Image (tube, grey):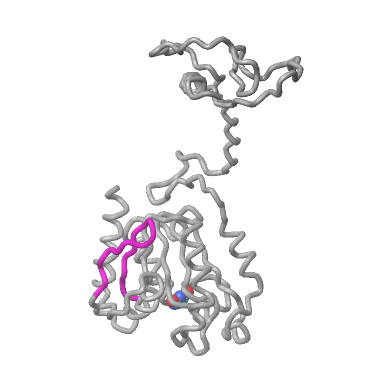
Amino acid sequence: MDDRLREELRAWLEFYRELGIEDFYRREPGAREPSVSLLPAKPVPAAAAPLPKLSPPPAAPPRPTVTAMPPRPVAPAAPAAAVIQPPVSSLSLFETPAAPRSGPETLAQIRDDLGDCHRCKLAPTRKTIVFGDGNPHAALVFVGEGPGADEDEQGLPFVGRAGKLLTRMIQAIGMKREEVYICNIVKCRPPGNRTPEKDEVEACSPFLYRQIEAIRPRLVCCLGAPAVRTVLGIKEGITKIRGRFYDFASTKALATVHPAYILRNPREEKILREDFEKIREFLQGA
Ligand code: URA
């Protein structure tokens, strides 16, 4: 092919490319015409086919007003996953509407996954796994330390003396206990109510994080230093950091003292009241 022909051919190819026609193929001389052409009806120059008599392509071919190729079919949108959620009107001020989730994990699924847990050394001495209790769409989640004797007996968090004080505090800010969700960093009672140990927290806290992710509250309230350490990774003394809001994942967290501390130091009750007022303001503010 001489240079002039090559140049003309190149110019034609460029012209067709500008029209959106890119699929050129070489038809062998003498090959039969396909009976059905999938290509646009325009002549497609093929390198070895008898070339049409080429005249120089128009210097600036008029731009077509229609596209040469049919628009690509758009894949039909996948049907939206069915998300069963309570009607918004049934939510109280203290609930967050259930957001559509890509990988919906429910509290029941997390509980199933926990099973008859023996992931740490608390299992042999516990009576009951205390998973958590309350509103699965709560705007407010409380995280305590671990079940005590009453909780171990009943399988519910914060039902002993500290729990009664917590319930009073919740009511003092105009909420009902059933509106919030309450859980702990470990789900089995540590012997003698000791503080949960590192390996126990490591084994159990992934379930806590999943619970919080499933609920997606607006605020997580950490009760006492071990909860603050587990949720926020803050090791400072609780009296220094209490009453402050922190970013936690896509939500906020507030650190306050554990109700059991107030039972031991009743004159400090105002601390807890103050922090609960902040919770009220936060939830009513948005
Ligand atoms: N203290 C906690 O930290 N959690 C409970 O469930 C009860 C008491």
Find out whether residue 196 is within the magenta segment: no
Q: In this image, 245 relative to 102: left or right?
A: left
Question: Residue shown at 27%/66% (left/top)?
Answer: 275
Question: Residue shown at 68%/23% (left/top)?
Answer: 27
Which quarter of the image is occupied by the N terminus?
top right
Question: Residue shown at 59%/74% (left/top)?
Answer: 129
User: In x, y percent, where is residue 49?
Assistant: 65, 19
Q: Is residue 53 above or below residue 138?
A: above
User: In x, y percent, where is residue 121?
Assistant: 58, 86
Question: Residue shown at 36%/62% (left/top)?
Answer: 248
Residue situated in front as seen by the camera: 46 or 171: 46
Q: How many marks?
A: 0
User: In x, y percent, where is residue 173?
Assistant: 32, 58
Hey, which residue is sitting farthest bottom in the picture?
192
The answer to which image quadrant residue 250 occupies is bottom left
Residue situated in front as seen by the camera: 203 or 216: 203
Q: In this image, 242 relative to 52: left or right?
A: left
Residue situated in front as seen by the camera: 48 or 229: 48
Ligand 1 quadrant assignment: bottom left
User: In x, y percent, where is residue 134?
Assistant: 50, 60
Q: In this image, 245 relative to 27: left or right?
A: left
Hey, which residue is sitting farthest front in the picture?
2
Query: From which residue to which does the magenta span run?
Result: 241-258
Q: In this image, 97 relative to 222: left or right?
A: right
Residue situated in front as seen by the camera: 35 or 241: 35
Find out whether residue 247 is within the magenta segment: yes
